[in-house]
Image: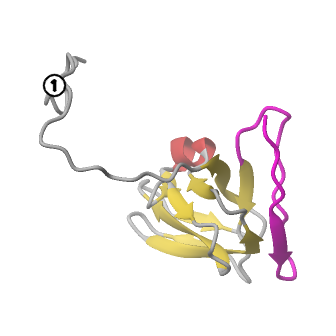
Amino acid sequence: MERIDVFIKTLDGATIPVYATDHSSGVDLCALVDEPLMLAPMERALVPTGLFIGIPEGFEAEVRPRSGIAYKHGVTVLNTPGTIDSDYRGEVKVILINLGSEPFAIHKGDRIAQMVFKKLARVEFRQVEDLTDTCRGQGGFGSTGT
């Protein structure tokens, strides 16, 4: 597995992300809120983490839901996956939405999302008259069965 250095700056009280296990794909992002933030059903909020990161060129960070709070409470990341570009230097914030039926409280230090780093490829589009044929062809949603 390739290892990269990601520089990090934190606000007071922020939790530096760590991998929960040796084989975890992502690191947990924790909320940095002054007081509990209540998310009513169908309400969304931009939740601060107090983290500022320097991602190397050629990589991105993806912000994804945590399966536990998604399953147990219906709380998920709204723009999944959220992309953090290598040239962004602002605070990492997470757009959470409560799709559950009960209010959900977010406290300082709560693990609210996970962040995965991905290597990128830069594409160059080349216009053509026709594309090569495949067995799927133009079959769209549901065309390969259930």
Magenta stretch secondary structure, dominant: loop
Taking depth in this image into account, of 110 and 46 the one nearest to the observer is 46
Q: Secondary structure at mark 1?
A: loop
Q: Looking at the rendering, which quadrant does residue 55 occupy? A: bottom right
Is 20 a magenta residue? yes
Taking depth in this image into account, of 81 and 106 the one nearest to the observer is 81
Q: Position of residue 59 (x, y in %)?
A: 64, 56
Name the quarter where the C terminus is drawn. Answer: top left
Magenta-tinted stretch: 1-26
Which residue was labeled with disc 1? Answer: 137
**In this rendering, position of residue 4 left or right of residue 122:** right
Q: Position of residue 76 (x, y in %)?
A: 50, 54
Residue 50 vertical placement versus 65 (above, below): below
Report the coloring of the rendering: secondary structure
**In this rendering, position of residue 32 left or right of residue 20:** left
Is 141 a magenta residue? no
Crowdedness of circle 1 by 10 Å Cα count: few (<14), some, many (20+)?
Answer: few
- Which kind of residue does numbered mark 1 sit on? Gly
Is residue 135 visible in the rendered structure shown here? yes
Q: Position of residue 107 (x, y in %)?
A: 71, 69
Taking depth in this image into account, of 65 and 124 the one nearest to the observer is 124
Counting the numbered discs, the total is: 1
Q: Residue at x 12, y 42 (%)?
A: 129
Residue 37 vertical placement versus 123 (above, below): below
Q: Residue at x 79, y 32 (%)?
A: 23
**In this rendering, position of residue 97 left or right of residue 50:** left
Q: Position of residue 35 (x, y in %)?
A: 71, 81
Taking depth in this image into account, of 89 and 20 the one nearest to the observer is 89
**In this rendering, position of residue 22 left or right of residue 145:** right
